[in-house]
């Protein structure tokens, strides 16, 4: 696979290995895997970044270099890096503050096998009982023409360059968002189109969740509910939507919660309905609203969910329990309609403010 960042990878290899660069790239599957994971480099901040898998490789290779194994042949006797140290280092890297342990534990190896099914090596070796980890040195060393080439330092340079590109793209997004926020009413069309672009299919899943939250927060903002514990003391309160934490967090399937109704919202980009059942089960089949990054009509989505539920669970009463747990489905057309309603109410600037605020928190953006 060749993309715009591939040339950067090749140039780093040329700087390191000169005329052997192309041969080393064709021989080293780990470089080819990194090439696949950096395809979003020039597609802007909205495209998937794959930092989790890249950083799992990065911290292990960094540990390998820091201990001098790239210049000696004693790595096979190394006791392994501690998981806690690797995990902490991942979170110190740009955009890595809230990364979880999936990439280090299995995600990298599983995906590598998918891309290179005939390869006998996997990138990450681990001793689960002792929580010790190694990069597979067989994937770092290339032997041909009676020469040995180690790509460890090149991998660090490649990922560092990718980080720099993504940081620059994200800063451009923030600046663009802030500029559009300050547009006059006459430029509202441009501002709304900008938000529509943030809902496109190639948008990073985290950014889609942020934009969905920002839209729905102000869509519900003026809706009022009356409630109370006594008939003579009924309170009036606006609906308020709260984001429960970082995106992709292990929070039991609750991305947003609404006060005072206690509604749960789960944002998803998958149309694999088995994931919906998992989310429903995680919260004990409490009613949940799904915000789905899909243009498929809501009724068709419901039909597919019910069909899969009947196939998987068969029993009518159980199928009904799952279907009853789906309080509402909000697809992309509905989300756009709700954004347009929020804009009509004068909330465009506040929606953009919220996108900026949540993006800076999510992507660990430092103003300095």
Image: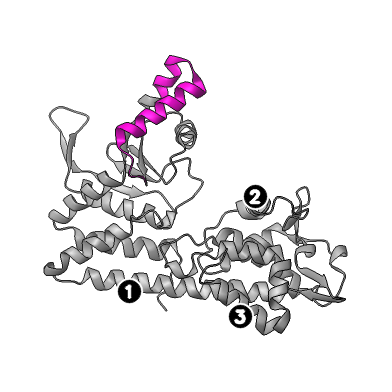
As helix, strand or loop, the secondary structure at mark 2 comes to helix
Question: In this rendering, would 173 be left or right of 160?
Answer: left
Task: Decide which of tag 1 and tag 2 comes sooner along the chain.
Answer: 2
- The residue located at (56%, 69%) in the rendering is 93
- The residue located at (66%, 84%) in the rendering is 15
- The residue located at (15%, 33%) in the rendering is 234
- Of residues 225 and 75, which is closer to you in this image? 75
**Above or below for 341 versus 315:** below
Q: Disc 2 designates what residue?
A: 114
Label 1 CA crowd tier, 10 Å (few <14, some 14–19, many 20+): few
Which quadrant of the view contains residue 195?
A: bottom left
Q: Disc 3 designates what residue?
A: 11
Q: Is residue 302 magenta?
A: yes
Q: CA distance from mark 3 to mark 1?
A: 30 Å
Disc 1 versus disc 2: nearer the observer? 2
Magenta residue span: 294-322
As helix, strand or loop, the secondary structure at mark 1 comes to helix
As helix, strand or loop, the secondary structure at mark 3 comes to helix
Residue 90 visible here:
no
**Residues marked 3 and 1 touching at CB (< 8 Å):** no
Magenta stretch prevailing secondary structure: helix
Q: Position of residue 199 (x, y in %)?
A: 33, 55
Q: CA distance from mark 1 to mark 2?
A: 38 Å
**Above or below for 76 versus 334:** below
- Of residues 231 and 110, which is closer to you in this image? 110
Q: Is residue 20 magenta?
A: no
Residue 49 visible here:
yes
Q: Where is the C terminus found, in terms of image quarters?
A: bottom left
Question: In this rendering, would 98 be left or right of 213?
Answer: right
Label 2 CA crowd tier, 10 Å (few <14, some 14–19, many 20+): few
- The residue located at (74%, 75%) in the rendering is 66
Q: Disc 1 designates what residue?
A: 175
């Amino acid at each position: 696979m060749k993309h715009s960042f591939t040339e950067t990878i090749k140039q780093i290899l040329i700087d390191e290995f000169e005329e052997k660069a192309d041969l080393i790239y064709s021989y080293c599957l780990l470089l080819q895997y990194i090439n696949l994971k950096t395809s979003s480099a020039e597609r802007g901040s909205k495209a998937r970044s794959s930092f989790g898998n890249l950083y799992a490789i990065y911290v292990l290779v960094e540990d390998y270099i820091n201990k001098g194994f790239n210049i000696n042949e004693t790595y096979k006797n190394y006791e392994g890096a501690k998981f806690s140290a690797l995990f902490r280092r991942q979170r110190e890297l740009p955009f890595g503050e809230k990364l979880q342990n999936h990439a280090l534990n299995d995600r990298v190896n599983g995906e590598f096998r998918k891309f290179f099914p005939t390869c006998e090596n996997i990138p990450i070796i681990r001793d689960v009982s002792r929580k010790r980890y190694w990069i597979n040195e067989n994937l770092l060393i290339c032997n041909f023409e009676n020469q040995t080439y180690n790509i460890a330092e090149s991998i660090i340079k490649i990922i560092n360059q990718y980080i720099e590109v993504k940081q620059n793209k994200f800063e451009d997004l923030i600046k663009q968002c802030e500029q559009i926020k300050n547009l006059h009413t006459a430029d509202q069309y441009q501002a709304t189109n900008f938000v529509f672009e943030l809902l496109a299919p190639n948008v990073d899943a985290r950014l889609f969740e942020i934009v969905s939250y920002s839209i729905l927060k102000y869509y519900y903002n003026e809706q009022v509910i009356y409630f109370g514990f006594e008939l003579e003391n009924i309170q009036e309160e606006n609906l308020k939507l709260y984001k429960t934490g970082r995106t992709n967090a292990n929070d039991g399937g609750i991305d947003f919660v609404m006060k005072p109704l206690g509604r749960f919202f789960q944002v998803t980009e998958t149309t694999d309905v088995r994931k919906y059942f998992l989310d429903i089960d995680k919260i004990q089949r409490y009613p949940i609203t799904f915000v789905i990054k899909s243009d498929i009509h809501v009724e068709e989505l419901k039909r597919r969910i019910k069909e899969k539920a009947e196939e998987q669970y068969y029993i009518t009463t159980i199928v009904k329990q799952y279907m009853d747990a789906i309080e509402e489905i909000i697809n992309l057309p509905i989300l756009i309609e709700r954004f347009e309603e929020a804009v009509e109410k004068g909330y465009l600037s506040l929606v953009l403010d919220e996108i900026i605020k949540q993006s800076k928190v999510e992507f660990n953006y430092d103003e300095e």
